[in-house]
Image (cartoon, rainbow, N blue to C red):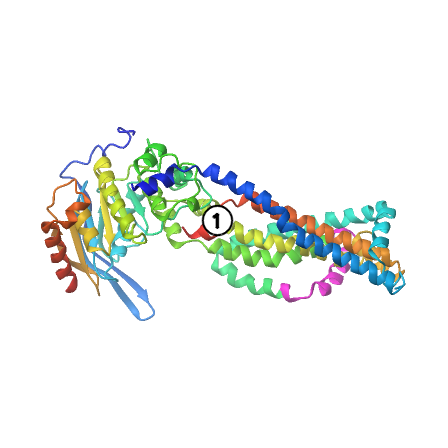
Amino acid sequence: MSIAEQQEAASDPIAARRQNAKRRKATSWRDRWPPLAAVAGIILVWELIVVGFSVPTYIAPGPVEVVTTVFERWSMLMMNLWPTVLESVTGFVVGNVIAVLIAVVFVHSRFAERAFYPIAVFINTIPIIAIAPILVLLFGNGFLPKIIIAALICFFPTLVNVTRGLKAVNPATLELMHVLSASRWEVLMRVRLPSSLPFLFAALKIASTTCVIGAIVGEWIGSNVGLGALIIEATYNFRSPLLYATVILAALLAVILFSLVSFAERKLIRWKVDAAAV
Amino acid sequence: MGAPALAPAANAGANDLALRLDGVSVTFETDHGPLTALQDISLSVRAGEFLTMLGPSGCGKSTLLRTVADLLPVSAGSVSVIGQTASEARRARQISFVFQDATLMPWLSVLDNVRLPLEVGRGNGVTIDAPAPAEDLLAMVGLRGREQALPHELSGGMRQRVAIARALICHPKILLMDEPFGALDEIKRDQLNVELLRIWEETGTTILFVTHSIPEAVFLGQRVLMLAANPGRVREIVDIDLPYPRDLALRDQPQFIERAAHLRQVLETC
């Protein structure tokens, strides 16, 4: 073993990591103030335009008015937020679980993949807006059609990504598992699923925001509760500040779901994705 | 170092055969008709022998290793590994394979990667008794203190050391190595060659080692199996009667250069 390599082996990786963490903290403010300043600037310009040009509230409310509405209508907004949360999160879980299970089947059966992949593509090409009324007719005004819509919208990106991820295994790694006499189940659990995690999370990040869209579209078609219903109601009654407040809440919901998925990704994937081929 | 745990396999007597190939042929079906990768290969390898395999691209060196590892079926002939079929030997964990890629699981620590062979295969009738302690194996390949590191924190040479430790955990009777140092720079390759000889002497395992490098083949092997291409067949088996332990200075000695020159001449006619 060379001297250089001994030094490499002796150097403390934990100390190096700690130093990195320190550096990250120091730079975090330097990284964060530009977007925060940009957002503050846009809000300011928005308020100035609305006040300066005396835009009527029902056409476009200023940010101050929107924020006031959020506080005044807090309980009503919350009452409508929870159904949307329930529908999006349930749809997210159901759609992604089914997608992962089907991806696993696809990887193990060329026949199943060839038979059902075109159907999955076809379902994906129907606009979600067009499926929504069909599902409402089929399943009524309850939570179920919204959950199905949210699930449908999550399903396809996850199916495509995870199928790719499960297949993106180094052929030599599969040979290794064969020499070790591993069963298909062991190959799935110990090689394919872990190595597909980066692909899965890429899809989950997309799904975490689109599932909210799915739930809201479902609520537009037939519902009296939920953020989608509130958007329709506020629009038809020219309650623009309420409309804006609802839209911002819906966006916040999507951002929170996205952040939760990103957090889980950072916790679960500690290896370098580029090194996945080693 | 856990000397007893890493001691040579008990029944590896000098006259036992580790491997016997009788008239082995391997044919692949391709779009352009059948392709003969190996034709009528017969070969015996003594237990504890270090055999290197050299030949031009496409001569079937890797194919030969893969038939011994039960990764490819033979089209004709028979493979006998410690008196068993390749499949039986695989299930008995008597064969280990080291690939050109380290093929480590990037999400497992170095220690867990070395222990992977203990975690899988039970469902397929694999029995593992008294594996070598993973910590001792890591110490043997010079990675003491890096047990908890993840593969991406290691250099290419260190990853290959982990792969060798993993290959040794079930005391294999035969270690198959398919250009394991082919992706490393020459300095690392030389170091690992020296270490591999040390490991071979410590463990007493039989090694079949595929390489593209003439100096590597001469430096490591007791014999060099030279294969010719199209179809892959045995061209010549060359004895390398240089005493062990061998060190890198040997490469500058006339007797080493002489043997390397001979291999080069044979290789030109392959």
Q: Which of B44 and B142 is in front in this view?
A: B142
Q: In this view, does A134 lie above or below A37?
A: below
Q: Which of A88 and A250 is in front in this view?
A: A250
Q: Is residue A148 visible?
A: no
Instruction: Report the quarter where the C terminus of chain B lies.
Output: bottom left
Q: Nearer the viewer, residue B29 or A149?
A: A149
Instruction: Report the quarter where the N terminus of chain B lies.
Output: top left
Q: Is residue A169 left or right of residue A154?
A: left
Residue shown at the point (17%, 53%) measured from the top left: B225
Q: Position of residue B7 (x, y in %)?
A: 24, 32
Quarter occupied by residue B111: top left
Task: Give the chain of mark 1.
Answer: A
Please name the predominant secondary structure of the magenta segment in the image. Answer: helix
Residue shown at the point (21%, 63%) measured from the top left: B229
Task: Please name the residue that numbered disc 1 is placed on.
Answer: A272
Q: Is residue A75 visible?
A: yes
Q: Is residue B232 left or right of residue A100?
A: left
Residue at far bottom of view: B32
Q: Magenta stretch: residue A271 in it?
A: no
Inspect the image, locate mark 1, and give the three-letter code of the amino acid beneath it: Lys
Quarter occupied by residue A149: bottom right
Please give the range of residues in magenta: A123-144
Q: Position of residue B77 (x, y in %)?
A: 21, 54
Residue shown at the point (25%, 48%) measured from the top left: B190
Q: Where is residue A20 in the image (x, y as percent from the top left)?
A: 52, 43
Q: What element carries label 1?
A: loop
Q: Magenta stretch: residue A140 in it?
A: yes
